[in-house]
Image: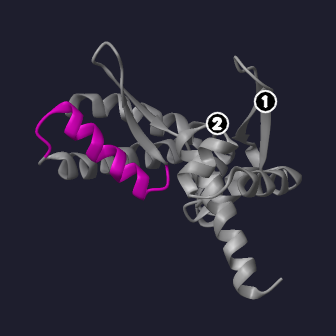
Amino acid sequence: MKKKDETSVKNTRKAIVTLLKQHGPMDAVTLASKLSLTGMAVRQHLYELQKQQVVEYEEEARPMGRPAKIWRLTALANRWFPNGYLQLSVDLLHSIRASFGEEGLWKILDDHNLTQKETYQAQLSDAINLKDRLQTLSMIRMNEGYFAEVQEQEDGSYLFVQKHCPIMEAAAVCSGFAGKSLNSFDRYSAIM
């Protein structure tokens, strides 16, 4: 395979994985329409990604014809997305815990969350209403690698969804890391 062809194949597979990350499970025909490709071309890529254990599928019954294969990402797909300076974060958490103990680690995480809240508040200051504030926050979080989006619900409420966690490895090292991040969103509700 030529270098240009290899790059094209990699780019198409990255686009498929990214669409599944952003929009959730879907069939090959839907993916094909979003990529302006044929269903057969997308299926070939999906089967190769399945061999690499990046995607898997479930069959979904349809009113007519055969069941459709609904493709979704596996946990191994996370390697395709940014890890936010993963190793540095993990190493720093170990060093902080070793130097300052568990209490010192929690103090630093609390300070970080407060700083992050202040940064978000400054970036959200121009947003007029709740929907605008949530959209702005989702863009901030997208830039941080979280694949965030806002979904308006039938009752008029909003659901803030993050489909990727670039700090997953750091959270595994420090079980409270993700919890502190989530708790900080409770505090953000006051700025919404």
Residue pointed to by mark 1: 58
Residue type at tag 1 = Glu
Q: In the image as oriented, which residue stretches furthest toward the bottom?
A: 3
Q: Residue at x 69, y 78 (%)?
A: 7
The residue lying toward the viewer, choosing from 6 and 174, is 6
Q: Residues within 10 Å of mark 2 (few under 14, many from 20)?
A: many
Q: Which residues are magenta?
A: 127-146
What residue sits 49% from the left and 48% below the top? 147
Residue 186 image-quadrant placement? top left
Residue holding disc 2: 25
* Along the viewing direction, whichever of 25 and 120 lies nearer the viewer: 25
Side of 143 relative to 35 (left or right): left
| Residue 43 badge | none
Rendered image coloring scheme: one colour
Magenta stretch holds residue 145: yes
Q: Amino acid at mark 2?
A: Pro
Q: How many marks?
A: 2
Task: Indicate whether 104 appears above or below 80.
Answer: above
- The answer to if 128 sits in the magenta stretch is yes
Residue 165 seen in the figure: no
